[in-house]
């Protein structure tokens, strides 16, 4: 640490005071300096990690968008397949009714 040419005082709540006093060091000033230096050192890494997370969110958002599009396409295919199945079922009922009529006609 360099020379301590800055002399300032500040007011804080008991909660802040207790937090500063829980930091490593001897006395309030050293504890406060240690806390600030630690935060300063960690800030760069945290900002880098935040940028990575933001990038990851962008990638996941694109993936989610693609999955939503695929889900919509799949729902459309299912809808059309169900419509085809319904038509096939109706056609089978029609064939069964024709067979029924033909069987009755053959019985007479």
Image (cartoon, rainbow, N blue to C red):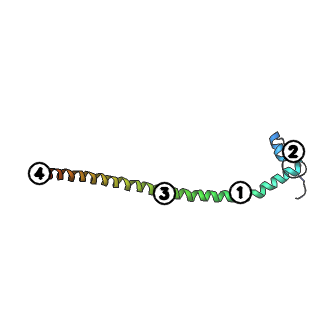
Label 2 or label 1, whichever lies nearer to me, is 1
- Would you say the residues marked 4 and 3 are in contact, meaning their CB atoms lie under 8 Å apart? no
Residue 12, horizontal then vertical, whole percent: 82, 41
Mark 2 / mark 4, whichever is N-terminal = 2
Looking at the image, the residue that sits furthest to the left is 108
Neighbor class of circle 4 (other Cα within 10 Å; few <14, some 14-19, many 20+) is few
Of helix, strand and loop, which one carries label 2? loop
Question: How far apart, in angstroms, are the residues tagged by discs 2 and 1?
Answer: 29 Å
Question: How far apart, in angstroms, are the residues tagged by discs 2 and 4?
Answer: 112 Å
Disc ID at residue 107: 4
Neighbor class of circle 2 (other Cα within 10 Å; few <14, some 14-19, many 20+) is few
The residue nearer to you, when weighing 68 against 36, is 68
Label 1 or label 4, whichever lies nearer to me, is 4
Disc ID at residue 9: 2
Q: Residue at x 83, y 43 (%)?
A: 18
Relative placement, left or right, of 77 versus 67 is: left
Neighbor class of circle 3 (other Cα within 10 Å; few <14, some 14-19, many 20+) is few
Disc ID at residue 67: 3
Label 3 or label 1, whichever lies nearer to me, is 3
Q: Residue at x 78, y 56 (%)?
A: 40
- Would you say the residues marked 3 and 1 are in contact, meaning their CB atoms lie under 8 Å apart? no
- Would you say the residues marked 1 and 4 are in contact, meaning their CB atoms lie under 8 Å apart? no
- Reading the image, the residue beneath label 1 is 46
Q: Residue at x 78, y 58 (%)?
A: 41
Mark 4 / mark 3, whichever is N-terminal = 3
Of helix, strand and loop, which one carries label 1? helix
The residue nearer to you, when weighing 16 against 4, is 16
Mark 2 / mark 1, whichever is N-terminal = 2
Question: How far apart, in angstroms, are the residues tagged by discs 1 and 4?
Answer: 88 Å
Residue 22, horizontal then vertical, whole percent: 84, 47
Relative placement, left or right, of 37 versus 106 is: right
Question: How far apart, in angstroms, are the residues tagged by discs 3 and 1?
Answer: 31 Å
């Amino acid at each position: 640490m360099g020379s301590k040419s800055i002399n300032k005082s500040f007011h804080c709540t008991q909660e802040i005071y207790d937090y500063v006093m829980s930091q490593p060091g001897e006395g309030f000033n050293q504890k406060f300096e240690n806390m600030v230096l630690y935060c300063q050192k960690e800030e760069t890494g945290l900002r880098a990690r935040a940028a990575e997370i933001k990038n990851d969110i962008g990638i996941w958002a694109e993936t989610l968008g693609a999955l939503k599009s695929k889900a919509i396409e799949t729902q459309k295919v299912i809808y059309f397949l169900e419509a085809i199945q319904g038509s096939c079922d109706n056609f089978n009922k029609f064939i069964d009714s024709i067979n029924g009529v033909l069987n009755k006609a053959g019985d007479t």
